[in-house]
Image: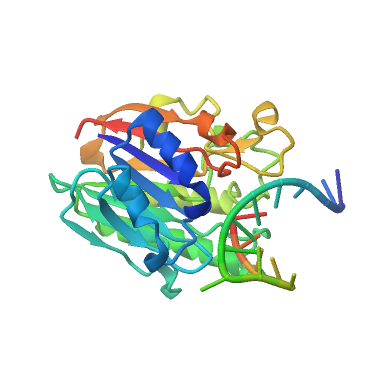
Amino acid sequence: MRLVTWNINSVRARLSHISKFVEDFAPDILCLQETKVMDDMFPRDFFADLGFEHMAIKGQKSYHGVATLSRVPFSDQWSRDWCEKGDARHIAIKLDGGVDLHNFYVPAGGDEPDPESNDKFAHKIQFVEEMTIWSEALATPSILVGDLNIAPLEHDVWDSKKLKKVVSHTPLEREAMMELIKAHGWHDVMREFVPASEKLYSWWSYRARDWRVANKGRRLDHIWVSPELGGKAKAMEVVLDARGWEKPSDHAPVMIDFDL
DNA sequence: ATGGTGGGTTCCCCA
């Protein structure tokens, strides 16, 4: 099973990218974040025509929004309202074989890394803490993917020292994410394929002059699995090509091949 | 130290 997580920064602005990606890489399941569209305006026909007839969609107007599109049927879908904000930041499905697939869009957290003065940063930390409590009680074998908006390891960013006070790589966020990983024993699947000593990114700012040359990236997108599913992933690729297509998302797709 | 780009029932907010 080929699984992809991709923050597409508006699904409607990225239809040609999705078509090309599906043509080139033939994924079985697409987990999208930042769809930026309400459910009644979601391009369902477009995905059905591409072969993704099974859809779990959770959207809202203008902001956030997640969607899991599948070629293979799934038996159940649900979402949860994290931090009681009413945001569309999570959608889950139950795959055949009893594995749950959770698709998350964690708050970015604003600019100022101080929970006292910045409500968005406080929200982000609270969100990760709720995920931690939830992870502790999670009994079902699960895959967790999405834009988690935190680059936890030194080599998940282009310069760890320079980004120490930049939201996404502050000690508070990195520690919160490590607690979350510990809470369920999540396996960081991307790092099973690229050792922690090597640079690995999934996001490059739109504001860089030449993103590929400067390569000031961050690993904000993640694929984790429950301990029972450790070793089931057979291949991983951050599809850099897609970041270079015309009018791209600022995130590259992260692709995993599973033998479930 | 600053500002850079992109998307959205857009003239401001969010990333």
Report the label total.
Answer: 0
Instruction: Pick the quarter of the image with the C terminus of chain A.
Output: top left
Horizontal arrangement in the rendering, residue A54 relative to residue B7 (left or right) = left
Q: Quadrant of residue A57?
A: bottom left
The answer to whether A22 appears left or right of B9 in the picture is left
Residue at image coords 38%, 66%: A39
Q: Is residue A184 visible?
A: no
* Residue A14 horizontal/vertical position (percent): 50, 47
Q: Nearer the viewer, residue A193 or A28?
A: A28
The structure residue drawn at horizontal position 35% and vertical position 44%, both measured from the top left corner, is: A30
Residue A97 x, y percent position in the rendering: 12, 44
| Residue A26 point in image, percent of width and height | 33, 32
Q: Is residue A19 above or below residue B6?
A: above
Give the residue furthest to the left: A97
- Residue found at x 55% / y 44%: A249
At horizontal 44% and vertical 25% (from top left) the residue drawn is: A194
Specify whether A118 is left or right of A70: right
Viewer-proximal residue among A118 and A256: A256
Is A129 in front, or is B14? B14
In the rendered view, would you say A16 is above or below A68?
A: above
Vertical placement of residue A162 versus A33, above or below:
above
Q: Is residue A47 left or right of residue A53?
A: right
